[in-house]
Image (cartoon, helix red, strand yellow):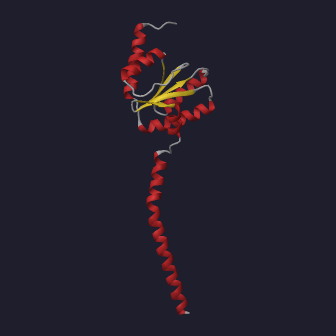
């Protein structure tokens, strides 16, 4: 069914608004994805505080041209959906959840994306998924900063123990 000019303009306007707000956009090919799995993908996007949109490739290309994204644009083959993530934490959550979802649903594939107004390859999305959470990184930092102090206290404590043992031996 043909889409009217007004509808195309509103879709293009929505795409432009989402692209301006988004810190990361992921292009996915959803060809062969069932309706149930598509709903799960939308739910997953919402859970990651992201937005999932489907649009015609010509409208997507027009929106990309208007927003002047640098780098080489990936080949948009198949049926294309866009997932927009606007916050920093959402980027990592979205990447992790998307990689898990793709493992369960082989029909869905990442084509590429946009991050910080540059095109990124699909490999970058899986690399973002492998980055530990902020809390895990902060835990590692605290442990690393605390480690020398703990070893110093342990070393001093060992010397103090030895000193006490020597004194108690001298007393006997």
* The image quarter in which residue 68 lies: top left
Tell me if residue 134 comes above or below residue 53 in the rendering. below
Tell me if residue 11 comes above or below residue 95 in the rendering. above
Q: Is residue 109 visible?
A: yes
Rendering coords of residue 126 (x, y %):
53, 36
Rendering coords of residue 72 (x, y %):
45, 26
Residue reaching furthest to the front:
72
Quadrant in which the C terminus appears:
bottom right
Q: How many marks?
A: 0
Rendering coords of residue 8 (x, y %):
42, 12
| 49 or 121, nearer to the observer | 121
Rendering coords of residue 33 (x, y %):
60, 22
Q: Which residue is drawn at 58% across and 35% down?
A: 100
Q: Which residue is drawn at 46% across and 36% down?
A: 91
Q: Can residue 25 be seen in this view?
A: no
Task: Tell me: 5 left or right of 162.
Answer: left
């Amino acid at each position: 069914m043909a889409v009217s000019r007004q509808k195309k303009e509103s879709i293009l306007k929505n795409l432009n608004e989402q692209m301006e707000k988004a810190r990361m956009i992921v292009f996915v090919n959803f060809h062969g994805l069932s309706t149930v799995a598509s709903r799960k993908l939308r739910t997953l996007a919402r859970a990651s505080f992201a937005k999932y949109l489907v649009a015609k490739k010509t409208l997507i290309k027009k929106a990309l041209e208007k927003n002047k994204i640098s780098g080489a644009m990936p080949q948009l083959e198949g049926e294309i959906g866009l997932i927009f993530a606007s916050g920093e934490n959402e980027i990592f959550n979205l990447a992790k959840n998307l990689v898990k979802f793709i493992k369960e649903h082989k029909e869905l594939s990442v084509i590429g994306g946009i991050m910080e107004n540059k095109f990124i390859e699909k490999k970058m999305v899986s690399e973002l998924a492998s980055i530990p959470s902020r809390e895990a990184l902060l835990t590692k930092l605290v442990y690393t900063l605390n480690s020398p102090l703990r070893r110093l206290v342990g070393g001093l404590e060992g010397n103090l123990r030895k000193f006490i043992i020597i004194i108690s031996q001298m007393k006997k």
